[in-house]
Amino acid sequence: MSDGTEVEGSPPGRVAALSRLGGARPRYPESLIRRLAALADGGSVLSVCAGTGEIARGLAAAGLSVVALEASEARIAVGRRQPHGQRVRWEQGCAEGARLGGP
């Protein structure tokens, strides 16, 4: 990555195009982020198929510990550069192949 607009292994301009997609659809309502944060009750959150992490970043901004699982390296790169993107632990992979700890 040189100037933050290209990702190794991605077609040229792919990350820049994904960055522009942020304005292509309506944002999630802040009330949804607040409701999800309340449901998490201070715990950890796993965001599956996270995309650029709009929900994951919102939950991280609310003080939650968030892991975002996303298959696209380009989408992860965009998400990391967005507000609160560095507060999210990004993992590249698909939900079908994810190894989740637990009982």
Image (cartoon, helix red, strand yellow):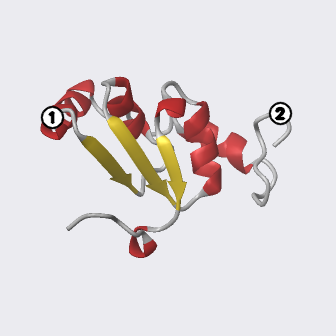
| Nearest the eye: 102 or 72 | 102
Cβ atoms at labels 1 and 2 below 8 Å apart: no
| Nearest the eye: 89 or 17 | 89
Say left or right for 78 vs 9. left
Instruction: Say which residue appears at 61% left-offset and 40% top-offset.
Output: 78
Residue 19 horizontal/vertical position (percent):
62, 38
Q: Which mark is residue 3?
A: 2
Report which residue position mark 1 lands on.
41
Residue 94 horizontal/vertical position (percent):
47, 68
- Considering only vertical position in the picture, is 44 above or below 29? below
Say left or right for 60 vs 16. left
Say left or right for 77 vs 82. right
The kind of residue on which mark 2 rests is Asp
Query: How much space separates mark 1 and mark 2, taking CA atoms?
Result: 38 Å
Instruction: Say which residue appears at 30% left-offset and 24% top-offset.
Output: 62
Which quadrant of the view contains residue 72?
Answer: bottom right
- Considering only vertical position in the picture, is 71 above or below 25? below
Structural crowding at the residue carrying mark 1, measured as other residues with C-alpha within 10 Å and reported as few (<14), some (14–19) or many (≥20):
few
Mark 1 or mark 2: which comes first in sequence? 2
Residue 36 horizontal/vertical position (percent):
20, 37
Structural crowding at the residue carrying mark 2, measured as other residues with C-alpha within 10 Å and reported as few (<14), some (14–19) or many (≥20):
few
The kind of residue on which mark 1 rests is Asp
Give the quadrant of the N terminus: top right
**Residue furthest right as drawn:** 2
